[in-house]
Amino acid sequence: MKRHAAVALVVLLMGLAVASLPADAKDKSGDAGRLLTGRVVDKQDAPLPSSVVYLANTRTRAVKTFIVGQDGEYRFPALSPNVDYEVYAQYKDRKSDTKTVSQFDTRSTVNINLKIDTK
């Protein structure tokens, strides 16, 4: 019984120690993260509706997708600032170049337009 009380006390003290850390020293998982936005366009900069944008986390290889609307715009909110991402778009059987969002780019909003040659 004394051992359980000691373990509970240690856990409580660790929790108090973490709670007393300055805000910038805590885990930033509650942070809103970064925002990736952009447009999918053809060679004449006209939007390509119904294109699919693929965003891959280079650490976990998890992939998110976004189907663009009539304006050709896409957005991926709440991205981890400590991870590199690769983004590309696909329209029918054509694909854009793959672009990288670097963890060393400290902007909170990153804008990348993806161009697809539709010919």
Image: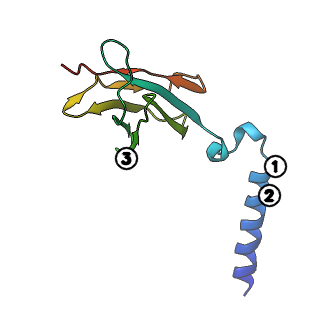
Identify residue type, mark 2.
Answer: Leu
Structural crowding at the residue carrying mark 1, measured as other residues with C-alpha within 10 Å and reported as few (<14), some (14–19) or many (≥20) = few
Q: For the residues marked 3 and 2, what is the alpha-carbon distance in whole angstroms?
A: 34 Å
Q: For the residues marked 1 and 3, what is the alpha-carbon distance in whole angstroms?
A: 34 Å
Q: Residue under circle 1? A: 20
Q: Residue under circle 3? A: 62
Asked if the residues shown at circle 2 and circle 1 are in contact, with their CB atoms under 8 angstroms apart, the answer is yes
Task: Return the x and y of residue 61 as percentages of the image width and height.
Answer: 34, 44
Say the numbered circle drawn on residue 16.
Answer: 2
Badge 2 marks a residue whose secondary structure is helix
Task: Return the x and y of residue 112 as percentages of the image width and height.
Answer: 45, 22
Q: Which residue: 18% across, 19% down? A: 119
Residue found farthest to the bottom: 1
Q: Which of marks 3 and 2 is nearer the N terminus?
A: 2
Q: Name the colour scheme.
A: rainbow
Identify residue type, mark 1.
Answer: Ser
Q: For the residues marked 2 and 1, what is the alpha-carbon distance in whole angstroms?
A: 6 Å
Say the numbered circle drawn on residue 4.
Answer: none
Identify residue type, mark 3.
Answer: Ala
Badge 3 marks a residue whose secondary structure is loop
